[in-house]
Amino acid sequence: MSKVKVGVLGLQGDFLEHIHILSALNVEPKIIKYPDELEDIQGLIIPGGESTTIDRIMDDEFRQALVEANKRGMAIFGTCAGAILLAKKIQDGKEWQKPLGLIDIEIKRNAYGRQRESFDTVINIPSLGTMIRAVFIRAPEITNIGPKVKELATFEEVPVLVQENNVLVSTFHPELSANPTIHKYFLSLIK
Ligand code: GLN
């Protein structure tokens, strides 16, 4: 049986770290830079980086292809900047930022402020029965979630890992701790 193909959006940000984690799991990772490459993957990771930059590079054709691929069943996992791009609404975004709206959340950019630009902590994921180390880098905060969105983990009562159908979002960087738990969970969402 051929391996499941999982893409990582490689327009900007720390996409190589995701490729490394995926390489250690039983899938075929692929860096995605063009919309037609979305056609033969079953899952896509949108990495952390700078959401405004990724937003600017992603043209309308790319956006449309991404939304359509998700509609026909491609699962998506957005981390940090990726979470911002997938949200329904961005608070404090640039006025030209056009989030993809693939998960019913509102998100606030750079919400932890400067003094906490970067920190790591341990969070509990009750549904997976495990604790993991979570690295937050100029992280956004999920300020509102819709009724169909499942809250899988929180930090200081704020959701940091959420899911709606086959779209998963984290405001931290699971690719930066040597623990594949969240990536494995994402792969379980791929049909
Ligand atoms: N602050 C960044 C943004 O607004 C996200 C940071 C990250 O992805 N680590 O896009």
Image (cartoon, helix red, strand yellow):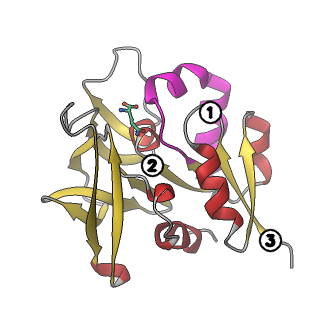
Where is the C terminus found, in terms of image quarters?
bottom right
Q: Which residue position is annotated with label 2? A: 79
Q: Quadrant of residue 23?
A: bottom right
Residue 26 lies left or right of residue 15; in this view the side is right
In this view, which residue lies farthest toward the top? 95
**Distance of mark 2 from mark 3, alpha carbons?**
23 Å
Percent coordinates x, y for residue 78 in the rendering: 48, 49
Going from the N terminus, do you reach mark 1 or mark 3 first? 3
The residue beneath circle 3 is 3
Is 129 placed above or below 120 here?
Answer: below
Q: Label 1: which residue? A: 64
How far apart in space, not on screen, are marks 2 and 1 (Cα)? Answer: 20 Å
The magenta span reads 46-71
**Residue 47's disc number:** none
Magenta stretch mostly in which secondary structure?
helix
Mark 3 CB near ligand 1 (8 Å cut):
no
The amino acid type found where label 1 is placed reads: Gln
Question: What residue lies at 38% left-to-right and 54% top-to-bottom?
Answer: 170
**Mark 2 belongs to which amino acid?**
Thr
The N terminus, quarter of image: bottom right
Residue type of the residue flagged with mark 3:
Lys
- In the visual, does 158 lie left or right of 165? left
The reply to whether the C-beta atoms of the residues labelled 1 and 3 are less than 8 Å apart is: no
Residue name at image x 61 percent, y 68 percent: 190
SS type, badge 2: strand
Q: Is residue 59 magenta?
A: yes
> Which secondary structure lies at badge 1?
helix
Please state which of the two labelled residues, at mark 1 or mark 3, is closer to the viewer: 3
